[in-house]
Image (tube, helix red, strand yellow):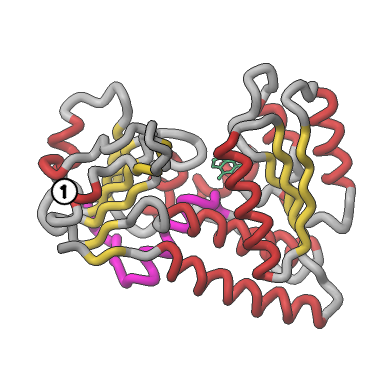
Amino acid sequence: MAKIISGKEVSLAVKQEVADEVAQLKNEGIEPSLAVILVGNDPASKVYVNNKKKACDFCGIRSLEFLLGEETTQEELMELVERLNNDETVNGILCQLPLPKHLDEQAVLNAIKPQKDVDAFHPENVGHIMIGDYAMLPCTPSGIMEMFRYEGIELDGKNCVVIGRSNIVGKPMAMLMLKENATVTICHSHTENLKKIVSEADVVVAAVGIPKFVTADMIKDGAVVIDVGINRMEDGKLCGDVDYEACEKKASYITPVPGGVGPMTIATLMKNTVTAAKIQNKRGK
Ligand code: GUN
């Protein structure tokens, strides 16, 4: 039976640390603030944005929300980003993805000032991650690394497999594990022999967006299984990319959905916001 890595527990520890740091910064006259932009009516995105606001409240971070209609134009969105870039009271800017189809996502991400880019999606920040010299990391991979540290899971020399090659999770996840001296394989929809590759992994990170994609016959006895998937099923319940009930019997550690990686993403966003505030106030890297 696997040990369950509780995202609730680990994220609370991270948020508590952030809250302590925010309190200290406020004593010095610095109030970290985060601006979140949501365009359109995606129900899942609305839930995420609401959870971000709650986490800001917990940590003492000032939060600003910009809820824009589905019909928002590229120009309007770019203007808002520019205004927030120039607003000295705003430390972090996050534009919730995915954006409605008529908008150019990459153009928006490129427009966010790198020092305020708390998602670390700007090409300049992506470049820093490639080099291994960074101030901010993308929230989901960074949250997963926090889970490894919290549980004392050592990656050095380990065979780690990431399923999924997105810019948000798969690619940066691979870079972070590589920095910890793991041997990393990235699998995706064109990978041949995916099952064989996954079955040799000491650590599996599933970020494919397909419910129960990772089955028990795919994983090695004692593997660490991290589930990034959040899939809404027809009955309204959430389901990960991992067949949890079956894999839990074989894995050494496993993350549940919900209550696993999801809360970590938000906790590391809080951490990034404080880092951004410190950089902008010449208090950090
Ligand atoms: N949509 C899903 N995950 C993320 C994330 O980490 N950041 C942003 N901005 N949008 C997302």
The residue drawn where x is 77% and y is 48% is 65
Q: Position of residue 203 (x, y in %)?
A: 25, 53
Label 1 SS: helix
Q: Is residue 247 above or below residue 109?
A: below
Does any atom of ligand 1 lie closer than 8 Å to the CB of label 1?
A: no
Residue at mark 1: 246
Amino acid under label 1? Ala
Q: Write down which quadrant ligand 1 falls in.
A: top right
The question of residue 150 being in magenta is answered with yes
Q: Where is residue 113 in the image (x, y as percent from the top left)?
A: 76, 44
Residue extending furthest toward the front: 235
Quadrant assignment for the N terminus = bottom left
The residue drawn where x is 20% and y is 31% is 194
Camera-nearest residue between 29 and 242: 242
Taking the image as shown, residue 18 lies to the left or right of residue 250, namely right
Camera-nearest residue between 100 and 22: 100
Q: From which residue to which does the magenta span run?
A: 137-159
Quadrant assignment for the C terminus = bottom right
Q: Where is residue 133 in the image (x, y as percent from the top left)?
A: 55, 56
Taking the image as shown, residue 113 lies to the left or right of residue 218, namely right
The question of residue 31 being in magenta is answered with no
- Determine which quarter of the picture holds residue 206: top left
Taking the image as shown, residue 179 lies to the left or right of residue 277, namely left
